[in-house]
Amino acid sequence: MKILDRYIGRAVLFQTGVVLAVLIALYFFSNLVGELDYVGRGHYTLPVALGYCAMLLPREAYQLFPMVALLGGMLGLGGLASSNELTIVRAAGVSVRRIMFAVMKTALLLVLLVAIVGEFVAPRLEQAARIMRARAMSQNISVNAQEGLWARDGDTYVNIERLLPDDVARGVMLYVFNDQHRLLQMVSARQAIYQAGSWVLQHATKSVLHDDSVTTADVAEERWHTDLKPEVLNVVALPPDKLSVQELAGYVAYTRANGLDGSIYALYLWTGIFAPLATAGMMLLAVPFIFGSLRSVGIGLRITVGGLLGIGFYLFNAGFGRVALVYHLSPFLGAVLPTLMVFGLWWLLMRRVQ
């Protein structure tokens, strides 16, 4: 049986690799065409644009992998079915469930790979790509909105105009309130540099509000001790779907500690946790299709059905999560329900397979 497991596993892995390579190539050239408009700005040359697009590929692969797993499973098992190899295996007394077990071994390998890419490879490469692109174009890494980036640390509200590489923030404003929400102090600094566990405010103006007067003083440097470390600010600056599970978990804890709404980050946290299970479910979904309604159809129809299912899952997974936030449903429910529906569909179809 180990020989059979390896044979089925190789067929599924090969087709999964082919599908992934084709889709990733399409996304690479699509991103490159979009970046060509920026080539020539500053030091942003064509080789830099090529490197930037290449560094985004792990993120694209991670997001596409549930659909890739379904197509790879359909094409791998479908190829064996078209050459009557699965028929021979069944005639030798091997059950559908035993074949599904072989597919499950391959799915577990892919789940592990997806988890590693999504947690360690894709977020770091994408952040490095954004920094490389920003430096080449002499631009900011990111700005949350026209009014800058806002954050809160206890009774202190922070506004940062720009985030730059190397833990530098430009245009920093601090607003300190008391327990009665009365403004006590304002600090305006041209820039802040994170050093030795705290921010150093440079060229700052400090205003202290008294009951009947305001005291203002210019300060060359002043240390600001806060829990808002550069990695926390980078999380705020980046879209939540570009972050690792570890970064999301840290920021969700920060929002809860400061009484902030972090539901969108909680949603993507749970989505990232369940993403490997979604990949496994999509690959297992190929088994009842090959042994059921698609056993005698051509490769073109298999690709069409697999593509439609994969796109449908991608859209529903993204859309339902946002609907859950709009109607104040649990982020956990918004993330887990699409994956549960995949396994539910697989279970229903497997009951019809003889």
Image: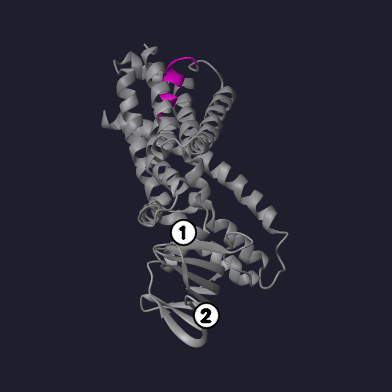
- Residue at (54% x, 44% y) in the render: 21
Q: Is residue 254 left or right of residue 204?
A: left
* 94 w.r.t. 326: above or below: above
Instruction: Determine whether the residue tagged by mark 1 lies in a helix, strand or loop.
Output: helix
- Residue at (48% x, 17% y) in the render: 295
Give percent across and percent down for residue 165: 52, 72
* 284 w.r.t. 238: above or below: above
User: Looking at the rendered structure, which numbered label has been put on residue 183?
Assistant: none
Q: Say few, some or many: other residues with alpha carbon within 10 Å of mark 2 (under 14 / 14 to 19 / 20 or more).
A: few
Give percent across and percent down for residue 25: 59, 47
User: Looking at the rendered structure, which numbered label has been put on residue 235?
Assistant: 1
- Which of these two is toward me, 124 or 153? 153
Q: Is residue 143 left or right of residue 128?
A: right
- Mark 2 belongs to which amino acid? Val
Read off the magenta span: 283-293
- Residue at (43% x, 37% y) in the render: 335
- Which of these two is toward me, 354 or 133? 133
Distance between the alpha carbons at the discs numbered 2 and 1: 35 Å
Report the quarter where the N terminus lies. Answer: top left
- Which of these two is toward me, 212 or 92? 212
Q: Which residue is mark 2?
A: 214
Depth-wise, is mark 2 or mark 1 nearer the camera? Answer: 2
Q: Quadrant of residue 14?
A: top left
Instruction: Determine whether the residue tagged by mark 2 lies in a helix, strand or loop.
Output: strand
* 203 w.r.t. 245: above or below: below
